[in-house]
Image (cartoon, rainbow, N blue to C red):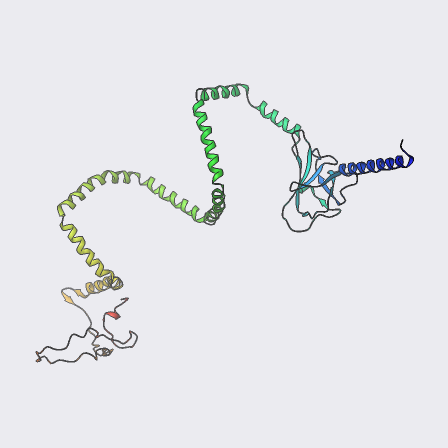
Amino acid sequence: MLTAGVRLKVAAFLLVGLTAVAFVAARYVGLFGTGGYQVTMKLADAGGIFTNAEVTYRGVPIGRVGPITLTDDGVDVELDLIQYDIPQDVDTVVKNRSAVGEQYVDLKPRRPDGPTLRQGSVIPQSATKVPLPVQTLLTNIDSLVRSVPDDSLRTLVDELDTATRGTTTDLQALLDSTHSFVGATTQHMPQLTQLVTDSTTVLHTQNDEAAALTQFGANAKLIADQLRSSDADLRSLIGTVPQLSVQVSQLIRDTDPSLGVLIANLLTTATVALGRHDAIQELLIAAPQAIAAGASTVTNGTADFGLSLTFFDPLGCTAGYDGTSRRSGLDNQPGRPLNTQARCTLPAASGTGVRGAQNAPNG
């Protein structure tokens, strides 16, 4: 038989146990709040959210939905949040957790820094989203289905049956190839990601060169227009080219091998002329003027010209010829080697009549 003291201890134990269970249950259902702070979320429509629904931040539970109040421009939803530093610049989305329509609130930060939410903060409607109501979704689907004519739908099904009948093997091969393609894509995902990242540079370059590309397109259009207007001439040219090619081939055969020797000799001439390109250019510029002056000199069988004696204006150049010794015309003995370094060493702007190839125009 239990004594009074034992009974008192058992009763006290049961009372403490029941109190602890009740406290844990109350905390679990959120009767005491989260011990954090309250934030007001403004919605144009409740979107199915309900009191005591879960609030998450980047998928992690951080609080519960509190009272929901109807306002003139929508509803105010109180969010009871745990003491976490959550950026104030967030997108608040009411989402469906399952197909049965259990909603919760998810906070998505736009940036990780900046001011944080605190007691009394308000999340405006512009930063909130609600899911599409199920009745609206079903209504839209019903409207879409009703908009398809029955005859057209029946024709589409018949054509699909005709197109796929007897192609089981081909369809299986297509699915297998698609599976292999997806596997290869997954295997090379880092390279594809890098390709997409690098394509940004290419797209920026194309955007920067948009004006040049536009001009290129305009010029291409001009060329196409010119080709269209010259269609008759081009057709005539295409008809003439075969005959011309035959004649050119015959000419090459008739001049062989002399033509090859001539081209080889011209190569030597071109090599010599290449080193004197500037001087030849100056000659070609001055030659027309000299020819024009010569043509105007001869008139009626006589030559009209002026003679200006300037033998010593300016004086001749002697600097640079000191190393060359004079030799008498009567001296027939072997002399010194030819002085190949003899040249006028004065600059062209010295005021003296300089001479030598090094002072040729542009040369």
Image x and y of residue 157, in percent: 50, 20
Q: Residue at x 44, y 27 (%)?
A: 173
Q: Which quarter of the rendering shows the N terminus? A: top right
Tell me if I can see residue 71 in this picture. no
Q: Nearer the viewer, residue 225 or 45?
A: 45
Horizontally, is 88 left or right of 239 in the view?
right
Q: Is residue 80 above or below residue 147?
A: below
Q: Nearer the viewer, residue 214 or 253?
A: 253
Q: Nearer the viewer, residue 127 or 329?
A: 127
Q: Is residue 2 above or below residue 251?
A: above
Single out the residue that lies furthest toward the front.
1
Tell me if I can see residue 103 in this picture. yes
Which quarter of the figure has residue 318?
A: bottom left
Which quarter of the figure has residue 72?
A: top right
Image x and y of residue 279, in percent: 25, 64
Q: Is residue 295 above or below residue 184?
A: below
Q: Is residue 275 above or below residue 209?
A: below
Q: Residue at x 47, y 32 (%)?
A: 179
Horizontally, is 278 left or right of 133 in the view?
left
Image x and y of residue 81, in percent: 73, 43
Number of marks present in the image shown: 0
Horizontally, is 196 left or right of 239 in the view?
right
Q: Which quarter of the rendering shows the C terminus? A: bottom left
Single out the residue that lies furthest toward the right.
4
Image x and y of residue 352, in percent: 26, 77
Q: Residue at x 19, y 63 (%)?
A: 295
